[in-house]
Structures are given as C-alpha cells and as structure tokens.
Image (cartoon, rainbow, N blue to C red):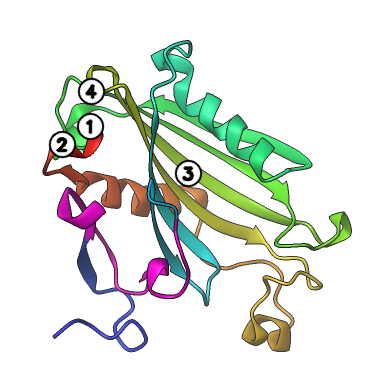
Amino acid sequence: MAPDPVTEPHVLVKRELYGGMMECILPARFMDISDFRPVPDHQEVFGDGDRDENFIVEILEYKADVSDEDSARFFFTDLAEANEASDTKVTLQETIPAAEMPGLDGAFFKSLCVGEQVATKHRDSQEKSNVIMILLANIRLPKYTTDILVTFNSPVYVNPSSSSITPHAREAGKTAVEIGTQEERIANFKQALKTLKINDFGLFG
C-alpha cells in the first residue's frame, strides 16, 4: 500500500519518470501533478500544495554553445526570464561529484546552481511578488544531444496578497516560510539527486 501523503508526508517513495525510463525517490508529500492537470511530455512535475514546492525533471535539447562550467547558471538565468523574475541572485554554483549521483554515468558532467528569484504567481501584479529559492541541477549528455534539468522550487517569502499563499498560512499571518535553511534544502535536494537513475537511454531518441 502506498504511503498517505497527509499522514506520512516524509516517507520516501520511488517515482517512475517517463514511463519508468528514469526514476528517483521523493517524499510522499510530493504528488504527481499529471494526476491533476496536463504536463508537457518533456517534463515530470511533482508538487506539495501545502508548501507550494515543486520538484521538476525536464529533458531538453543539448545547448552545445554553453560550456559545462556555466550550464547550470545558464539554465537558472533562463528560468528567471521564463518566470519574468524582477530580481535574482545566485548563492551557490558548483560541480556535482560523481559520488553524489551514483545512479548516473560518472562521465556525465553534472552541476548545481542555487539562488533566489523574485517573481509573481499566476497573474498577480508585481506588488504581490514572492521570493523563491531555486535549486537547479544540470546533467549533460552530449552523446544523446540532451540536457537534463532537475529543479526544486521552494518559497522563502510569500507575499500576504499572493495567490499562492495557502489558506492556513494566511489565517496564521505567516509570510516567512519556515521550511528550513538553505543548507537543509540543498541537503534534501541532493538526497533526491542521489537516487536519480536512467533505466533506458532510448528515452533520448
């Protein structure tokens, strides 16, 4: 029996990605968003509505004109533009050692970019912006002309007028999100990355 995401939110669950061609392990509180709304074929999206957090895996065309060392930051900036972020800052950028992602070929270049973006949710006005911590890992597969992105979005500050604030948080008057420090979030993200596996390279054509 699958764990209940309400009563057992922190129990770890194996999630099949792309029909089992990839997989990773996530806390049960992250629900498969495709059960509730359409998700693009190149994405796998899991979310925790109570915390407004998302864990996303994307398969993208390989960016040959972007160096390995700059790739995670490139995609972080690209995401900020897509989110129409009014402000961004990068707090950490590093290469991910092979030992931290044992489920993937050690020859694949893997990097991490962590930062914050100030952005609105849905159709909110700029005055209702939230501060979101973005943890982004990039796995480069030039042989398969593919860049894999793994992104974790976690709010740091939720504007009291934002459409993304939960009824519970609004009732309690909470705007500072107490989910953990940056170090704790990075540790949790890396734990998920450690379980990421590619089971079938036919996924990449």
Earlier-in-chain disc, 4 versus 2: 4
Residue 78 against residue 132 in the figure, above or below: above
* Percent position of residue 133, x then y: 57, 49
Earlier-in-chain disc, 2 versus 3: 3
Identify residue for label 1.
Answer: 205
Q: Is residue 167 left or right of residue 108?
A: right
Residue 184 in sight in this render: no
Q: Tell me the quarter of the picture where residue 138 sits.
A: top left
Q: Which mark is residue 108?
A: 4
C-alpha separation, residue under disc 2 versus residue under disc 1: 5 Å
Q: Tell me the quarter of the picture where residue 173 sits.
A: bottom right
Identify residue for label 2.
Answer: 202
Label 1 is placed on what type of residue? Gly
Are the residues at dot 4 and dot 3 in contact (C-beta closer than 8 Å)?
no
Earlier-in-chain disc, 4 versus 3: 4
Are the residues at dot 4 and dot 2 in contact (C-beta closer than 8 Å)?
no
* Percent position of residue 195, x then y: 19, 49
The region drawn magenta spans 16-39
Q: Quadrant of the C terminus?
A: top left
C-alpha separation, residue under disc 3 versus residue under disc 1: 27 Å
Closer to the camera: disc 4 or disc 1? 1
Are the residues at dot 2 and dot 1 in contact (C-beta closer than 8 Å)?
yes
Q: Tell me the quarter of the picture where residue 4 sits.
A: bottom left
Closer to the camera: disc 2 or disc 3? 2
